[in-house]
């Protein structure tokens, strides 16, 4: 039989439990409804969830392009950060078949080799404020690359559209 504290204290029945003191329990604490924590939550062990936690999505792991590699992307790679850290050659990333919502972000981590992205129609700009470019091959050249240059492409089902960019790119 479960006894409810509010049946014994009228103030709790009307106001709920409010305290400026720490609450300690030697048993499991079960919260029905939504728990709101407004301070720091400190765990002495990893929390165990009985359902998937909600909140901001986490970024998928990066795929690195090494010396002159050709990386063929799949829809399952959507959302991943693609890192050009090649020190020679020109890595090439091949986009998967166009499907609405697929998203890829490239980051320059080495300026000793540029990189290309191929597949479908790519619509971007020469730089973040530059003129529009369109083609089936997008290039970030070694001559213009700066560590930290990025470009994000999102597919609308037909075209690959630039949604964020820093750095200089060309299309052919």
Image (cartoon, grey):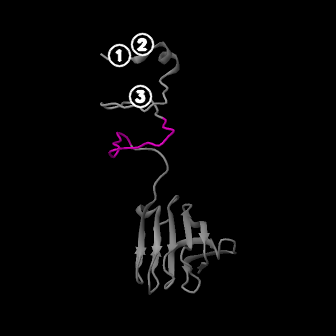
| Main SS of residues in magenta | loop
Which residue, given by chain and number where applicable, does mark 1 sit on? Answer: 3
Between the C-alphas of marks 3 and 1, the distance is: 15 Å
Can you tell which mark lies on residue 32? Answer: 3
Of the numbered discs 3 and 2, the one sitting upstream in the chain is 2
Are circles 2 and 1 on residues that touch, CB within 8 Å? yes
Q: Position of residue 7 (x, y in %)?
A: 42, 12
The residue drawn where x is 47% and y is 43% is: 40
State which quarter of the image contains the N terminus: top left
As measured in the structure, the alpha-carbon distance from the residue carrying label 2 to the one carrying label 1 is 8 Å
Q: Residue at x 51, y 72 (%)?
A: 107
Which label was assigned to residue 168? none
User: Could you say whether the residue bearing mark 2 is in a helix, strand or loop?
Assistant: helix
Judged left or right of residue 81, residue 51 is: left
Q: Nearer the viewer, mark 3 or mark 2?
A: 2
Q: Residue placed at 45% from the left, 29% from the top? A: 33
| x and y percentages locating residue 18 in the rendered image | 49, 26
Name the front one of labels 3 and 1. Answer: 1
Q: Quadrant of the C terminus?
A: bottom right
Q: Residue at x 55, y 63 (%)?
A: 154
The residue labelled by disc 2 is 7
Magenta-highlighted residues: 36-51
Q: Counting other residues with Cα less than 10 Å from the Cα at mark 3, is it few (<14), some (14-19), or many (20 or more)?
A: few
Q: Nearer the viewer, residue 21 or 58?
A: 21
Q: Does the magenta portion include 114? A: no
Instruction: Give the vertical position of 67 relative to 10 (above or below).
Output: below
* Foreground of the two, 76 or 152: 152
Mark 3 lies on a secondary structure that is loop
Q: Position of residue 125 (x, y in %)?
A: 65, 73
Which sits earlier in the primary sequence, circle 3 or circle 1? 1
């Amino acid at each position: 039989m479960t006894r409810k504290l509010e049946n014994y204290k009228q103030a709790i029945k009307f106001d709920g439990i409010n305290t400026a003191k720490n609450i300690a329990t030697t048993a499991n604490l079960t919260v029905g409804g939504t728990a709101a924590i407004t301070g720091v939550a400190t765990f002495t062990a990893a929390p165990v969830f009985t359902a998937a936690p909600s909140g901001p999505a986490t970024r998928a792991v990066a795929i690195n392009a090494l010396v002159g590699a050709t990386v063929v992307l799949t829809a399952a790679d959507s959302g991943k950060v693609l890192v050009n850290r090649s020190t020679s050659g020109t890595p090439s990333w091949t986009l998967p078949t166009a499907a609405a919502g697929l998203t890829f972000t490239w980051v320059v981590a080495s300026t000793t080799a540029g990189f290309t992205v191929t597949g479908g129609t790519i619509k971007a700009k020469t730089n973040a404020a530059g003129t529009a470019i369109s083609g089936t091959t997008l290039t970030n050249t070694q001559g213009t690359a700066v560590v930290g240059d990025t470009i994000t492409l999102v597919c609308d089902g037909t075209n690959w559209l630039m949604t964020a960019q820093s750095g200089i790119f060309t299309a052919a």
